[in-house]
Image: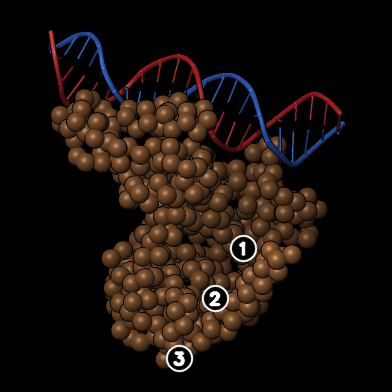
Chain colours: A brown, B blue, C red
Amino acid sequence: MFIEENAESLMDKNVEDLLSKELSDRRIFLDKRVLSPHYVPKELPHREKEITDVTRTIAPVLRNEKPSNLFIYGKTGTGKTCVVKYVMRKLNEFVQDPKKNINNAVVRSVYVNCKIRDSKYKVLLKVLEDPSLNDPTLKDVPLKDRAHSKGLMGIEPSELYDRLFNVVEKNGMNLIIILDEIDMVRKGLDDLMYILTRINDDLSSGNVSIIGMSNDMRVMRRMDPRSKSTLCEEEMIFKPYNALQLRSILKQRVEKGFQPGVIDDAIISRIAAFAAQDGDARYALRLLQKAGEIAVEKNSSKVLQEHVEEAKKRVEEDIIAEAISTLPEHHQVVLYALSLLVSCGGFYRRLNDVGDGDFLTGEVYEAYENCCKKLGLRPRTTRQFSDYINELEMLGLIITRSSGKGQRGNTRFIRLGYSPKEVKKIVEKSLGISTI
DNA sequence: CCTCCACAGGAAGCGCAGGAGT
DNA sequence: ACTCCTGCGCTTCCTGTGGAGG
């Protein structure tokens, strides 16, 4: 009885907290949505040239001609996605207007985030499942009913091709496929490029063009030269924003997202300076939002410098924690093994006499095997392990360099990208284990 | 020079999960 | 309920590579 009452009052308190938080939220924030990385504002400062270039590239669709494929490279938070979405929105508005769309061009664009659709098959499915392709004149629309399902297996790839072909052909459609984070397509990227370009040879009306985006130049090295040249008919590079540009971007969002007078210019400059190291606008916005949240938390009527400092710390922790805890189990075990190695690595250091925190592939594999044993997992083979290492490096969670002089042959030095203590803590929490 | 070591990473194939068709 | 088919993660087998040591 007593406990129940306690629990109830605890719950009451939670609800009350939430409600009052909502109110205090309003003291700082005006509209949190404009701070989201997915928000595409009406004006995109400092990307005017990029917008014209993208527009020029895709404009031929208005004459029912196939535009060049476009590859956009730029680090995270340089506005790639934003610019492309922006142009697509404008294009869509233009096409909707019968007065402007004098050729009656049927234009559709499908946005695919390859981080989620990470294989050729999933990308094709996503394109076909897109509501804008689901033309009611098509009898063959069985995909629509299953749009909610997790995925469609058991359909032959050639059938996927046929369906895509039919949709485009029957509508004389100018289809623009936007492949964001194209470097995340692990399986069959070359194949995908081949399919999406070859379709144009078979089509008697309509066309398919591709806009690929990536923040990793290495994707080009992995690609077949032929699919590389088809994708890169046009190439663009988005440069990182400088502190000044970030400041005006932040100002724009502050005006819409925050109550007036809550954030001083000095605060904006500070956030811009932090984010300018990578020229990353997304990071800047995240800092801005977090600083605001901390101000709410601290019951402050304004956002202060100390809130920004705190926000920086928390955002960085969040980013790492999110990256690690969404990883598959064995990837996390590899990180865990590495973090343990660092904290008790003296023995290995004496043996190998290399930089502190650097370990050879063999050592890390051995540690990984041990961790698996203690966690009751079956260790994967070295071959698989090698892929884990590559994937972890791609995510920046570990840093590898190939062994130079003084070490035997063709191996790599592996080190953690972040503090081992922190990595250890995150993995333990994520996998629900206690220190081995 | 050759050979060995310790590894990187390509190719093939296997078993599984799960949707489609019957 | 059943088979058939697919993608996917994985293992097995294999070839390539660069320094160390003979």
Q: Which residue is mark 3?
A: A260
Q: Residue type at mark 1: give it.
A: Arg
Where A193 sits versus A134, above or below? Answer: above
Foreground: A236 or A317?
A317
Q: Are marks 2 and 3 on the same chain?
A: yes
Q: Are marks 2 and 1 on the same chain?
A: yes
- Which of the numbered marks, if any, corresponds to residue A108? 1
Answer few, some or many: residues within 10 Å of disc 2's Cα (few below 14, many 20 plus, some between 14 and 19).
few
Instruction: Give the label, 2 or 1, closer to the camera.
Output: 2
- Which of the numbered marks, if any, corresponds to residue A33? 2
Chain name for mark 3 = A
Q: CA distance from mark 2 to mark 3?
A: 16 Å
Identify the residue at horizontal 70%, vertical 37% (top origin): A154
Where A135 sits versus A16, above or below? Answer: above
| Image location of residue A162, percent across then percent down | 68, 44
Instruction: Give the label, 1 or 3, closer to the camera.
Output: 3
Identify the residue at horizontal 59%, vertical 76% (top origin): A17
Where C17 sits versus A311, above or below? Answer: above
Q: Residue type at mark 2: give it.
A: Arg
